[in-house]
Image: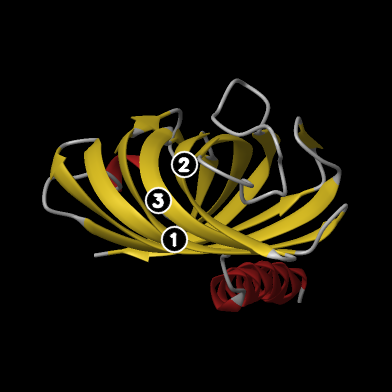
Amino acid sequence: MRGNSKWTGLALVAGLAVSSQAVAADEPNLNSDPGKASDFGQASQVVISQELNGFLGYNTASEVFLIRLEPSADYFLQQNLSVGASALVAFGFGDSTVVGLGVLGRVGYHLPLNERVSFWPKAGFGVQFAHVPNSSDVNFVLDFNAPILFHVSPHFFVGAGPQVRALISQDVGSLGSEQGNFSGNDVTIGITTTVGGYF
């Protein structure tokens, strides 16, 4: 009788072990298919992203709250070296109401930091049409942004980082500046966020 109890106990323990393994196997693993920073930035890769800039930061020309939407496309010429372009759509509120439209070309270099995090600084130059009350202007744009990317899953990332943008203007400037030609008086510093995918 005692021997039967022993075998029954062993069978019960084995059954519990198998059941616990089955339950563990059924639980979803959120990291089962993570993105990898090393997969990003390969030659011939195309990246489509949307950058949203909410500049609550500092502008040397005027006090404004500036929102920018910048749909972008980039192409890696070789590993980690990218070229691309973005459309510029800007709305500003504060000392004046501003509307801006333009296009920006840019070059970037991708640096993996660890398995899922990387650094993708980009420098760009473009042109922007700006309208403020009673005046319009076309100005040139110098841009630098340096987002840290988190690779959520294969072919998908989110990121954020600092951005500095300077305007070279012939007239009013897209932020309502009355300084004329650029002399360091129309610079915006803020934070940019980005979300995108690549193939």
Q: Secondary structure at mark 2?
A: strand
Question: In percent of the image, x 82 and y 57: which residue is there?
Answer: 96
- The disc labelled 3 sits on which kind of residue? Val
Decide which of tag 2 and tag 3 comes sooner along the chain: 3
Task: Tell me the tag on residue 102.
Answer: 1
Answer whether labels 2 and 1 touch (C-beta < 8 Å). yes
Question: In percent of the image, x 75 and y 73: which residue is there?
Answer: 5
- The disc labelled 1 sits on which kind of residue? Gly
Answer whether labels 2 and 3 touch (C-beta < 8 Å). yes
Question: In percent of the image, x 71 and y 39: which residue is there?
Answer: 178
Q: Is residue 26 visible?
A: yes
Decide which of tag 1 and tag 3 comes sooner along the chain: 1
- The disc labelled 2 sits on which kind of residue? Val
Determine whether 150 is above or below 47 in the image. Answer: above
Question: Disc 2 to disc 1, how far (Cα)?
Answer: 9 Å
Task: Please state the horizontal and vertical placement of residue 177, each as a whole percent of the image.
Answer: 71, 41
Name the residue that disc number 3 marks.
127
Rendering quarter of residue 183: top right
Q: Secondary structure at mark 1?
A: strand
Q: Secondary structure at mark 3?
A: strand
Task: Please state the horizontal and vertical placement of residue 63, each as a whole percent of the image.
Answer: 86, 43
Task: Please state the horizontal and vertical placement of residue 151, each as a whole percent of the image.
Answer: 47, 51
Name the residue that disc number 2 marks.
141
Question: In percent of the image, x 48 and y 37: which residue is there?
Answer: 143
Question: Disc 1 to disc 3, how far (Cα)?
Answer: 6 Å
